[in-house]
Image (cartoon, grey):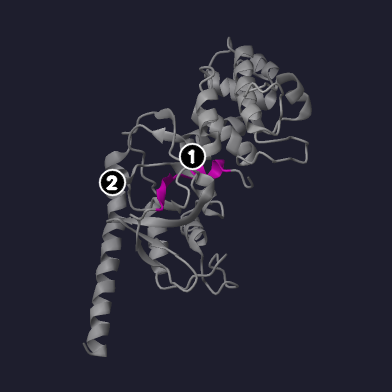
Amino acid sequence: MTVRKAWIVAGAALAVCLSFVMLLVVGVFIVAGNLAGGVGGASKALAKGAVPAAYQGIVQKWGNLCPAINPALLAAQLYQESGFNPNAKSPAAAQGIAQFIPGTWATHGVDGDGDGDRDVWDPKDAIPSAASYDCKLASYVKDVPGDATKNMLASYNAGAYAVIKYGGVPPYKETQNYVKTITTLEASFAAPVSRVDPSKQAAGAIYYAQKKLGTPYLWGGEGTAADGGRFDCSGLTQAAYESVGITLPRVANDQWNAGAHPARDELLPGDLVFFSDDLDNSRAIRHVGIYVGGGYMIDAPRTGAVIRFDPIDTPDYFGATRVTEDGAKALPTTV
């Protein structure tokens, strides 16, 4: 084959790929219209790998301690508090995976693993203690009108007295934001029981990523002038969704928590797709791309490569996230 013919063939192939992507972009809006309003409630089961394997069983067990909580909600609290870091310590002296302050731990810490001590640094004690404390708060406000879970979360933030005084979530901005944050994050830790709404911004994110095809990879790249317009994997996905007004965290394993998790056969263009060497731990995710349909994504794969189309059906495929504005806003800035 001559060089001229090779370029013609390559150009034609690229044109077909770009046309395919544009059809998918248009299709996102059509699918969004068809599926809107057809979503059911979330399951109390944890999404695959949402919690590190070492804590999965504990969160699942203790997350069912009382009706006001569930495993996904408990997982959302732990992620918000510490990012599942058992050694976390805050400037306010909060300690461990559940971020208990010493006074609260002294009153509410429990011996979750039955080994004879209550250790705030041991997740086998701290996670059961968090669940137990939630349930105690729920019991304090059980006669208050409204949603029992939201009243419990408001009690956690503002105190049970404030919830009782105001007959529900008190009119404090901080408390209302806390309740919304945890209940929104809950959806990213729960295994969906039905299809989840497609993102309205998905088409724009794909369009942005499509324009970056052929751009060289740069470790830590965010596409800035200082980076020469280059990206790494999560820098590309962050910039793609930033272009449509959604701010994602910088690293892939936190981007996982920006929405609900559709099954492989429910993927839609614009979903983020993730890859890991540990399929039981979302904190171990090491790569992310933007799904475009047909089993392919646009991603920035590695040093020496360029932004390109890659297949998603590989042994290290972890799962997907359907990004939402509320889901992204609920994510802590640091974990």
The answer to whether any part of residue 171 appears in the image is: no
User: For the residue labelled by badge 2, is the local secondary structure a helix, a strand or a loop?
Assistant: helix
Residue 110: give x, y in percent of width and height: 67, 21
Identify the image quadrant of residue 76: top right
Identify the image quadrant of residue 211: bottom left
Give, as a three-letter code, the residue at label 1.
Ala
Farthest residue, direction top: 143
Above/below status of 256 relative to 166: below
Q: Which residue is mark 2?
A: 31
Residue 272: give x, y in percent of width and height: 42, 52
For mark 1, does the 10 Å Cα neighbourhood hold few (<14), some (14 to 19), or many (20 or more) residues?
many
Above/below status of 277 relative to 71: below
**Distance of label 1 from label 2 (alpha carbons):** 27 Å
Residue 96: give x, y in percent of width and height: 69, 36
**Residue 50, disc:** 1
Farthest residue, direction front: 115
Q: Is residue 25 left or right of residue 242?
A: left
Magenta run includes residue 299: no
The answer to whether any part of residue 12 appears in the image is: yes
**Which quarter of the image is occupied by the N terminus?**
bottom left
Q: Please tell me whether mark 1 or mark 2 is closer to you in this view.
A: 1
Q: How many marks?
A: 2
Task: Say which of 16 and 91 sits in front.
Answer: 91
| Residue range (magenta) | 316-331
Task: Say which of 195 and 2 sits in front.
Answer: 2
Rendered residue at 48%/61% (across/down):
233
Rendered residue at 70%/16% (across/down):
161
**Which quarter of the image is occupied by the C terminus?**
top right
Give, as a three-letter code, the residue at label 2.
Val
Above/below status of 133 relative to 260: above
